[in-house]
Amino acid sequence: NNMIDYKNNKPFVEGVAIEDIAASYPTPLYIYSQKKIEDKYKKLKNAFNAEIFYAVKANSNQAIIKLMSRLGAGADVVSVGELERAIMAGVNPKKIIFEGIGKTNKDIAFAISNNIRLINVESIDEIQRINKVAKENNKNVDIGIRLNPNIDGQTIDKISTGKKTDKFGIDTDKLQEIFQALENAKYVNLIGISCHVGSQIFNIKVFSEIFIKMKTNAQLFLDKGYLIKHVDLGGGIGVTYRDKDDELDLELIKLELDKCFENVPYQLSFEPGRYLVANAGILVTSVVTIKNNGGINFLITDAGMHSLIRPALYQAHHDIEVVDKSNSELITYSVAGPICESSDILDKNITLPKQKVGNLLLIKDTGAYGKVMASNYNSRGLPVEILVNNNFFQKIHQPLTSQEFIKQDIIPEWLD
Ligand code: PLP
């Protein structure tokens, strides 16, 4: 799980000292390990006989998308912005799938004009709207249907997407309505079905349930005469956020996969995000101040919910490691960000060697849903992102300075 190596008690990523990076760029900053991403991709690709579409939402930096594309992955995008990123990063449009529950006609037209692999529709009305836009553009458009298979991903509620009551996909009880809508949509070709039941799935029985339900549904479409070429089994492959936890065993998923899909006439695919990048990133932060309030020792850091919102939003856990371990005295700390919100806590009651102002802390496993969810809240800047590759490091994102983003506001003349 760990992308950090220690030499003489100093942390390194792929031969680069983290302290050297932190001396070159202001904290908080994200560091990603290219090798770790490559290893995760290869592990997944070798385990499953399936196409991989990287879920760009997990980390949409173009350098990361490009790396995935060079490894052979396609891209799973959920907005025009992500689609533009994937195209700019050089992903072959025929390896891009476009999902998302709120596509406007303008979004659909943009996807059609870029000749992508397919648009995954999430509501019946979307079939009708794609047909209309396709007709206006005099094109036939390939689509997939994202089904809602009514499966409990047995993950935290805020990242569950496959239950009947979740807003995603089309209820599998509505197959007759789907068939009817497709019948009337002459400019639309149905070539695939997909689902995604949530993130951080660890229970093999959940994967098995997904596979069985998707196979059954694919057969229903085939029986109706639709040439289903692609069955996409979603993302959600769980990762560990604690070094002490065991990783998910991909072989167990593979066993279920092979058992379920023997000799099927379609290609299988997955659309993972977190699995490929979460463990390949860390957020480096500096201790700004240290204080004791009501008996609690707070380490106040320059990273907070504006740089990594997962702990505040989902009560997500990230292991935190210190760089300076020289003090043998151990202290129980709560690590909190600088944002004016009580929820801006990165972790509570963790025992660390006694720290000083200016020390570096490493917030681990932050390669997915980290920087992409960062904000300028409290008018603070976004973190720099660094990619490390075999003894080299390079900045892969330069955020706007506060002067630059403040300038984006427009004060109306009547207030002058
Ligand atoms: N596909 C879809 C449709 C999603 O909504 C998501 C995440 O929300 C993913 C794939 C990626 O999920 P994960 O990062 O857990 O693999």
Image: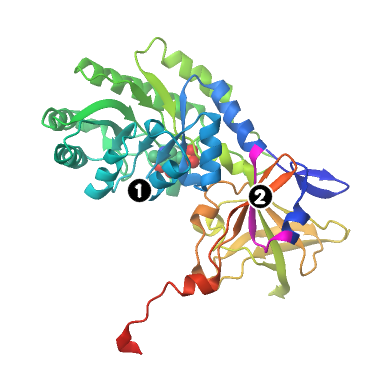
Give, as a single range, the part of the protein colored magenta. Answer: 24-34
**Residue at the image point whose x is 16% and y is 39% from the top:** 128
Q: Is residue 398 above or below residue 280?
A: below
Q: Which residue position is annotated with label 2? A: 394
How far across and how far down the image is residue 8, in percent?
Answer: 88, 47
Q: Is residue 162 left or right of residue 227?
A: right
Check the image and name the residue furthest to the top: 263
Q: Is residue 92 left or right of residue 6?
A: left
Cβ–Cβ under 8 Å for marks 1 and 2:
no
Q: Where the C terminus falls, by quadrant?
A: bottom left
The residue at 35%/48% (across/down) is 80
Amino acid beneath label 1: Val
Q: Which residue is mark 1?
A: 80
Count neighbours of disc 2 (C-alpha within 10 A) and say few if under 14, some if 14 to 19, many if 20 or more.
few
Residue furthest out toward the bottom: 416
Kindly give the residue lying farthest to the left in the view shown.
184
Q: Nearer the viewer, residue 122 or 131?
A: 131
Badge 1: residue crowd in 10 Å (few <14, some 14–19, many ≥20): some
Vertical side of 47 occupied by 184: above or below: below
Q: Which mark is residue 49?
A: none
Whether residue 100 is visible to the viewer of this picture, yes or no, is yes
- State whether residue 128 is above or below residue 395: above
Q: Position of residue 240 (x, y in %)?
A: 61, 40
Instruction: Residue 315: tell me if it is visible.
Output: no
Looking at this view, is 156 or 124 the one in front?
A: 124
Q: Residue 42 occupies which quadrant of the picture?
A: top right
The quadrant in which the N terminus is found is top right
